[in-house]
Image (cartoon, rainbow, N blue to C red):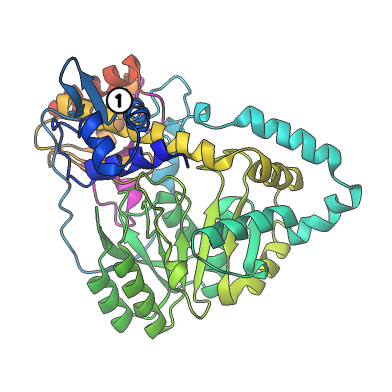
Amino acid sequence: MKRYEKFADEIAELIRTGVLQPGQKVPSVRHASRTYGVSPSTVFQAYYLLEDRGLIQARPRSGYFVREHAKRPLHEPDISPRPAETTDVDVSELVFSVLGSLRDPNTVPFGSAFPSADLFPLQRLARSMAQSVRDMPVREVISEMTSGNPDLLRQIALRYMVGGVMLPMEELVITTGAMEALNLCLQVVTEPGDLVAIEAPAFYATLQVLERLKLKAVEIPVHPREGIDLEVLADSLANLPIKACWLMSSLQNPLGASMSEARKQQLYELLQRHQVPLIEDDVYAELYFTREPPKPVKSHDRDGLVMHCGSFSKSLAPGYRVGWVAGGRYAEQISRLKLMTTISPSVPAQAAIADYLQHGGYDRHLRKLRHALEMQQGAMLASAARHFPASTRVTRPSGGYFLWFEFPEQVDSLQLLQLALAQGISLAPGPIFSATRRYRNCARLNHGHPWNERSEKAMELLGRMIKSF
C-alpha cells in the first residue's frame, strides 16, 4: 500500500469511529504534513482519494470537511434481546416467492444478494481463464477434480497466513461456492431432527438449508453492531442439545454486525467448553472498510472445532462458483462427502482464479471495490435520511453492501415489496430472514450498485410508500 493510501485509511478510520464528525474540518494540508510527518503532496493525494470515496469534500478557501452523509441522521436499530427460540423451519415457499419477484433485470436492485458486476475485473479474469486453460496439461483436468487446483490451494493458504491464521493446506477443501461448503459442513456434524444455533435475523439461505436437511433452528438474537448475544447463546448451549452453530462473526448478513476480537475469543471458548462445532460463514471477509481486516473466529481455533467457509463470489468472481472450507478436524469427512455428491467445482474456474491471484492484482482490485462500496453506502444513508420517516432506524456496517432498515411498526415489508415492484424497485423483506417470520417492519437494501439519479429517485419513491402505511 502506498503512503498516501495508508494515510487516507487513517483519516477514514477517524471519520468512521466518530473522532471526526460530519461537517467537521479535517486537518489542513500544512498541519497534517507537520503532524504526521508526510509531505504535502502525500496529504493532497490522500485527501483526493477520500473525496473520491465520498468521505470528505473541499470548500473554497476553507479547506476539507467531513461530508454530511445525512443532514438528519437516522438512528441505529435497537433489536431487543429475546430468549432463544427452537422451531421447525418452513420458509422456502416464502423465500422462493420473494426471490422469484426480484429477477426482473429492469428493477432497481435494492433486493439483490450481489453487488454490481461492473465492480469486478471480469475481462481480466477471462484472460486468466484462457491462459490457464491453454497451459493446463490434459492429465491435470482429471487429477485436480478430486484434490483441487494446487496453485489455488496455495494462494488461499497464503491469504490465511497473511491474515495471521496458520493452517495446513490439507485442511482446505475447494467447493462449488460457499453454499456447498456450508451445506457439507452441516451434513457432517448433524442428523435430521438435530438442533442448530443460528442468528436472528439470519441469511435466508441458512433457513432453507436447515429446512432441506430437516434440522431445527435455535434462533439467537444479534445486535446490529456487537453481533450475536453471547449470554443467550451460553444459556441455549447449557440447556439444549445443540449439535452445531452456523454464524457470521464479521459483516453478518443481513445486519452487517461485526464482533470484536474479544467477543470472538469468548465465542470460541464457549463453544470449546461445550464441544459444539462452529460453521463460520465468512463470505464478506474481504469487503471491510476498516484499516485492518477483521480476523475470523477460526484464528482462535486450537483444536479444529471451527469450519471456516469462504468464497470468491462476493469479492472477485460472481458466477465462477469457487469457494472453500478450512475444515479443521472435519476436513477429511467434508472432502469425502463432497466426492459423494458434486465431486469437484469447475477445474478451469479454479485455474483462472489461481492465475488472477498470482498475477492479476487482487489486492489492488479489493481496495477499489471497498472504496466504491463505502462511497455507495454513504450515498444510500444520506438518501434514506432525506426521504424515509424520521423514526426509521438503520444499521451502519463497517463493510459489505447491505443496510438493514427498521421502519415504523405499522409498515408491512411484504406489502411494501409488492408496492415497490410495481414501481420497478426491489427489496428484501424482513420475514425471509427469520425462521419465525419476524421483522415484518424491516427490510434489507443493497447499496452494491453504482449510485445514480435512478437510485436516488427509487429511494424517494420508497420513502413515499413507507409513509403511506
Q: Please identify the quarter of the rendering in which residue 353 is found.
A: top right
Residue 66 location in percent, x, y? 20, 31
Question: Residue at (35%, 18%) from the top-left corner?
Answer: 452
Inspect the magenta stretch and tell me whether residue 40 lies in it.
Answer: no
In this rendering, is residue 149 above or below 306? above
Question: Residue at (85%, 41%) from the top-left corner?
Answer: 135
Inspect the magenta stretch and tell me whether residue 425 lies in it.
Answer: yes
Q: Please report the bounds of the magenta region as a residue range.
A: 424-450
Which residue lies under the disc numbered 1?
A: 420
**Callout 1 secondary element:** helix
Residues 6 and 411: in front is 6
Residue farthest along the right direction in this orientation: 138
Residue 114 appearing in the image: no
In this rendering, is residue 332 above or below 213? below
Question: Residue at (72%, 31%) from the top-left corner?
Answer: 127
Q: Is residue 417 left or right of residue 133?
A: left
Residue 305 location in percent, x, y? 49, 76
Question: Residue at (49%, 59%) from the top-left corner?
Answer: 163
Residue 430 location in percent, x, y? 29, 44
Residue 209 location in percent, x, y? 49, 57
Q: Is residue 467 left or right of residue 199?
A: left
